[in-house]
Amino acid sequence: MGVNFVISRPKTENIMMTNRTFTMIKPDAVANGHIGAILDMINAAGFRIVAMKLTQLSRHDAGQFYAVHSERPFFGELVEYMTSGPIVAAILEKDNAVADFRTLIGATNPAEAAEGTIRKRFATSIAANAVHGSDSDENAALEGAFHFSGREQFNY
Ligand code: IDP
Ligand code: MG
């Protein structure tokens, strides 16, 4: 009566999880050779990497990803910058992931970022601020799904 062929999938897509956030290591930090140091800080803070890739945003991608900022005066600069070179996109897992990751990265403006944060250490300006971190569980799910299929997200 036919064959039941079932692929075991690591995760169901589009389920909002409170223990996941989405990050990008931005073009300045990649170009300056800081991928390894930033991933070390992420691991040391207790986050597990459940999806990751080196990629580059097209202007269309960046416009979509940052659509919420399209009316802001810095939008053009932001799209230019975010498309200027490769980025590392990743989904991270930890209890309270969104809030804890925002604490780890520090304030948007590196001049205001706390000591010991990723932006304090690696950001070069308010635009080139080394890393992205989702601001809510809903956006974490949307941003993760923007970059990764369900099959690219792991549980381990
Ligand atoms: P966030 O990344 O800390 O959440 P947002 O306000 O969401 O900060 O802004 C998104 C990104 O836009 C920032 O990370 C930064 O790269 C860029 N950005 C924010 N404010 C400015 C600005 O005043 N000038 C230039 N770029 C900015
Ligand atoms: Mg934001």
Image (cartoon, helix red, strand yellow):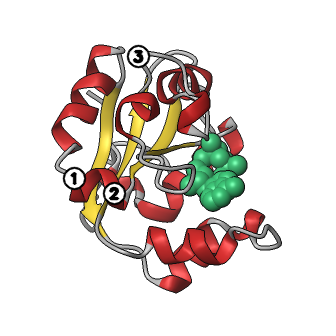
**Rendered location of residue 63, percent (x, y):** 62, 77
Check the image and name the residue furthest to the front: 111
Q: Is residue 26 above or below residue 100?
A: below
**CA separation, marks 3 and 2?**
19 Å
Q: Is residue 110 left or right of residue 23?
A: right
Query: Which secondary structure, mark 1?
Result: loop
For label 3, count other residues whose C-alpha is less than 10 Å away and answer few (under 14), some (14-19) or many (20+).
few
Closer to us: 148 or 97: 97
State if disc 2 and disc 1 touch (CB < 8 Å).
yes
Q: Is mark 2 within 8 Å of ligand 1?
A: no
For label 2, count other residues whose C-alpha is less than 10 Å away and answer few (under 14), some (14-19) or many (20+).
many
**Rendered location of residue 32, percent (x, y):** 22, 52
Question: Which residue appears at 55% of the width and 74% of the height?
Answer: 79
**CA separation, marks 1 and 3?**
19 Å
Residue 32: image tag: 1
What's the residue type where badge 2 is placed? Asp
Quadrant in which the C terminus is drawn = top left
**Rendered location of residue 16, percent (x, y):** 63, 39
What's the residue type where badge 3 is placed? Gly
Question: Which residue appears at 49% of the width and 30% of the height?
Answer: 105
What's the residue type where badge 1 is placed? Asn
Q: Is residue 16 left or right of residue 57?
A: right
Q: Which residue is mark 3?
A: 116
Query: Which secondary structure, mark 3?
Result: loop
Question: Which residue appears at 65% of the width and 66% of the height?
Answer: 66
Quadrant in which the N terminus is drawn = bottom left
Query: Which secondary structure, mark 2?
Result: helix
Rendering quarter of residue 111: top right
Closer to us: 17 or 52: 52
Residue 155: image tag: none
Q: Which residue is mark 2?
A: 28
